Every structure is written in C-alpha cells, then in structure tokens.
Image (tube, rainbow, N blue to C red):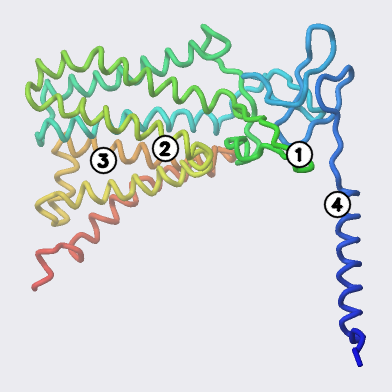
Amino acid sequence: MVMGPKPLSVVLVLLCVVCVTVVQGFKEKKRFSYEKGVVKTLSHCPGHYCGRTELENGSWSACGACERGLRRNESSACVECNDKPEFYDKLYLGFMGLLPLTFHLGCIDAAAMRRTFTREVMTLYASAVIEVVVAAVVTLLVTEPVGSFSIRSCKVRKLADWYPLLHNPNPNYEGPLHCTQEAVYPLYSMVFVFYTLCLLVMLLVRPLLSSKLLPGRGKSAIYSALYFFPALIVTHAVGAGLIYYSFPYMVIILSVISNAAHFAFQLDQSMSALLEGCVRDVRNLVILLGHWGLHAYGIIAITQLKEGVLHGSLCALVPLPALFYILTSKFTDPSRINN
C-alpha cells in the first residue's frame, strides 16, 4: 500500500509557498517607479546623483548625470553649484599643493648630497617653490569663474560624493543608470590640472638650471619627479575621498615620523649635540622649522580653529615631538646598547 505524504512534509511545503508569496508581494510593493525619458514637468529620479537638466523648450531631460559644474538638488533638478569652498576645503587644496613641493625639495636634497646649503642648492629650492606656485596660480585662474582667484564649488556632504561611480542606481534591476559626475566640483578635477601644470612647468625650467648648477646629479631630481607625479595622480584618482577626510592626521603622523628620522641620521646622538645642531646648523634648523610648520598645519586642519584661543594654543605643542626625541636620545642611542 502506498503511503501518503507525511503531515510534517505538507506543513513545510505550505510554509515555503507562503514565504515565496510574501516575498514576491513585498517586492511588488517596493517596486520603484519613475518617469523614463524626457518629461514635461520635473519628476524624481532614482539614486543619489541622477538628475534632470532643463531643456530649451521648457521640458526636462531623462534621468542621468548632471553636466560639469551642476549637481542634483532635492527635486532631482541639475542646478549650478554656487557654494564657496569652506576653510577645510582650502586646507585640503593646500595639502595637495604641499605634496609635490615636499617631494621636490626632498629629491633635490638627495640629489645634491650636501650637508650644508649652497647657492646652487638654494637656487634649485627656489625654482621648485616657484614652479609649484605658478602651477597653483594658473590652476586657480583657469577654474570657474575663469580669471578669478575665487572658486565656485559643490559642497562636500559625505564620502560617497567622491565616488559617484560606485552609486549608479539600477532601479527594479532593469539596467543601471549611468550618473557618474564630479559631485565635489571642482575639488577633484582641479588637482589633476594642478599636477599636470606642475610637471609641465618643471620640464620647462628645471633641466636648464640643473645642468648649470648641479651637472650630472641634478637630473636625478627631475627623473624622480617623472615617477612621483604619476604616482600622485593615480593615488588621487583612487583615494581622493579618503585623503580628503584623513589628510590632517596623515600630516601630523608623517611630520612626527619624518622629524624623528631626521634626528636619527645625526651621527652624535647626545642631547647637547642634537640641541647644538638645531641652533648652529642652518640646514638642520630649516628642516626642523619645516616639520614644525607641517605639524601646525595638521593641528589647524583638525580643529579648523573653531574655538580660536583654545585651538590656536594647541600650536604651542608643535615643538613637543622634537623635544621628546632630544630629551630621550640617551636612552635610545645604539652606541649605548652594549654598555
């Protein structure tokens, strides 16, 4: 005799059918609806960055990426960005300008292989500073509004604004809408322009100076720049958003590490020798002041000087890492390990 299905099996089958029905009904209720193509009246677009552009006949375009310099508002209309860069944005742009300058100075110092400042080395330092300043000025002048040092921008609201490529919507899984745009205009694109101009100005000025001032060795600093500029461009293309939110902490950490490395290269690690080297040796003094300046820059970027007196007083802590290294040098001197 053939036995029928067990009661437990019947219950499981019924539960599966009910679950599938509920899920399908839930999906139908959550189905996203929006008007496709050109519309006469403005309607909502899916995603965070898809918008509609007003056409000449008064209608609105299909949902897509806004043009450069425009950004979607709450009504999904692409409107012109007229925000002014905040103090933090300016500090971020300043940090992106300090990066190539720091690399230039370090490469020139390594190529010169001299423990003191000479006229030739100082001239190359000045050339690097002028190159970066000229590139920065031209970048500001070619950024809208053209011919002005002021910038109109789109306000940065969140980390996703730097990576709209990762947020193209796929409503109802019918196909993705490509709405990739510069949502942080022009903070993303103008850095690429700046790096390109830095490279061009360097190639126009530096080879002639290097051949006359540091024949044979000066070209290595130029070759180094041909490597680190592409590296900076790729890093910015991939990690611009992460750099934007973390650069103050990066500045402080790297300045402390670089400061310690500078002292560690001194042959005499005694406290008196380190103090004397900071005062008498002009090169060491300039390097030390540069580290202090970067450290103060990081503190200002973190606090943004929102409480002027309190946050400004934190800059008095800038010499602390150098003093800590000097005061504890006798405990970390390798020559004392065997003793």
Residue type at mark 4: give it.
Lys
Residue density around tag 2, few if under 14, some if 14–19, many if 20 or more, within 10 Å = few
Q: Nearer the viewer, mark 4 or mark 1?
A: 1
For marks 1 and 3, give the CA distance.
60 Å
Identify residue for label 3.
288
Q: Dot 4: what SS?
A: helix
Identify residue for label 1.
174
For marks 2 and 4, give the CA distance.
41 Å
292 sits left or right of 333 in the view: right
231 sits left or right of 304 in the view: left
Which residue is farthest front?
1
Discs 2, 4 touching: Cβ within 8 Å = no
For marks 4 and 1, give the CA distance.
14 Å
Towards the viewer: 62 or 290: 62
Residue density around tag 1, few if under 14, some if 14–19, many if 20 or more, within 10 Å = few
> In the figure, 147 relative to 301: above or below?
above
Q: Residue 269's spot in the image, x, y percent?
A: 14, 56
Report the residue at 27% width, 27% height from top.
226
Q: Is residue 300 visible?
A: no
Lower sequence index among marks 2 and 3: 2
Q: Quadrant of residue 132?
A: top left
For marks 4 and 3, give the CA distance.
63 Å
Identify residue for label 2.
235
Lower sequence index among marks 4 and 1: 4
Q: Quadrant of residue 156?
A: top right
For marks 2 and 1, give the CA distance.
34 Å
Residue type at mark 2: give it.
Thr
